Image (cartoon, grey):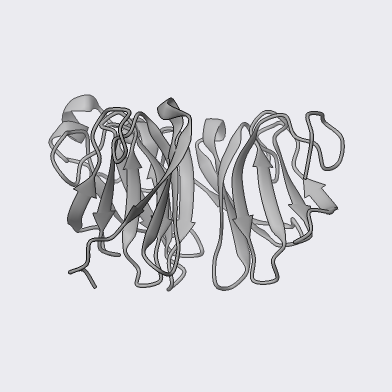
């Protein structure tokens, strides 16, 4: 479905995608600052959003997630916020503003401070957990933040660094049916796995072009059989990884 253009059903730079329980498809367009909705067969249904900073407007929307209550969440990247809608495009809520964390604070994981909680430095991707916890990749703050479905800050994890549990630009994020989190670490060319509370479990990947190596992973999704699908951006491919067992 879709072709290059700005008419209904067309795309300039499609960036995020989500599917609800009925199979309807929602796609964000990074350049056209809008969300489009399609049938499972790819037929255009509706769209919403225009360039701007007001509620329901966007400045480069990227990630989309739909929770178990059928609310849709969008990372509005250059407005440094998350917006919440119903599946008919009605604006419901927003949270976040621009708040960079200093390099020193981030490196030493001194992340918890009142001015940093709930604010972002280029949020890129978003995922909804089984209990409707909303996880946001706060990319240039090198962390993941967790919120309630109403945008209440719950906790955060990460920080700038190369050890497991740290990031150098957190990008794609996904949650499996057991609540495990998977986060793409863009500049360290790896995928990291966490508990639903943000405790580090394991990691895969290193820089390179061979199978199992990565070059700038940007997005990720998981299936119910333990398959991990990675957008290996710099290698121009999709890679599929599998859990090695031993993790619940």
In the foreground, 178 or 123: 178
Where residue 190 sits, quadrant-wise, is: top left
**Residue 3 percent across, percent down from the top left:** 79, 34
Left or right of 114: which side holds 47? right
- For the point 28% across and 27% down, the residue is 208
In depth, the one of 6 and 80 nearer the eye is 6
Observer-nearest of 75 and 239: 239
Q: Please tell me in which quadrant of the rendered image residue 158 appears.
A: top left
Residue 117 rendering spot, x and y as whole percentages: 34, 47
Where is the C terminus found, in terms of image quarters?
bottom left
Residue in view at x 42 percent, y 26 percent = 234
Q: Is 161 left, or right, of 114 in this rendering?
A: left
Question: The N terminus appears in which quarter of the rendering?
Answer: top right
Q: Is residue 55 visible?
A: no
57, above or below 40, in the image: above
Q: How many marks?
A: 0
Instruction: Say whether residue 61 is visible.
Output: yes
Find residue 169 and report its horizontal and vertical position in percent: 33, 33
**Residue 226 sits above or below residue 237 on the image:** below
Instruction: Between residue 40 and residue 151, name the one nearer to us.
Output: 40
| Residue 150: x %, y % from top left | 51, 63
Q: Residue at x 43, y 73 (%)?
A: 131
* Outermost residue to the front: 210
């Amino acid at each position: 479905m879709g072709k290059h253009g700005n008419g209904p059903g067309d795309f300039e730079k499609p960036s995020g995608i989500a599917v609800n329980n009925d199979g309807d498809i929602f796609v964000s367009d990074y350049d056209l600052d809008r969300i489009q909705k399609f049938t499972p067969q790819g037929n255009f249904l509706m769209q919403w959003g225009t360039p701007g900073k007001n509620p329901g407007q966007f400045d480069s929307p990227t990630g989309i997630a739909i929770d178990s209550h059928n609310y849709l969440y969008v990372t509005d990247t250059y407005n440094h916020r998350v917006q919440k809608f119903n599946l008919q495009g009605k604006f419901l809520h927003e949270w976040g503003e621009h708040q960079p964390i200093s390099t020193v604070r981030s490196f030493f994981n001194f992340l918890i401070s009142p001015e940093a909680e709930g604010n972002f430095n280029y949020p890129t991707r978003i995922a909804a957990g089984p209990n409707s916890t909303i996880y946001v990749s706060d990319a240039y703050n090198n962390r993941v933040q967790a919120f309630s479905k109403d945008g209440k800050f719950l906790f955060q994890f990460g920080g700038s660094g190369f050890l497991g549990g740290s990031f150098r630009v957190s990008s794609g994020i996904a949650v499996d049916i057991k609540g495990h989190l998977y986060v793409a670490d863009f500049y360290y060319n790896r995928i990291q796995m966490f508990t639903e509370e943000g405790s580090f479990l394991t990691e895969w990947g290193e820089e390179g072009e061979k199978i199992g190596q990565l070059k700038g992973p940007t997005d990720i999704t998981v299936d119910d059989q333990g398959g991990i699908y990675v957008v290996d951006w710099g290698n121009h491919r999709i890679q599929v990884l599998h859990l090695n067992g031993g993790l619940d």
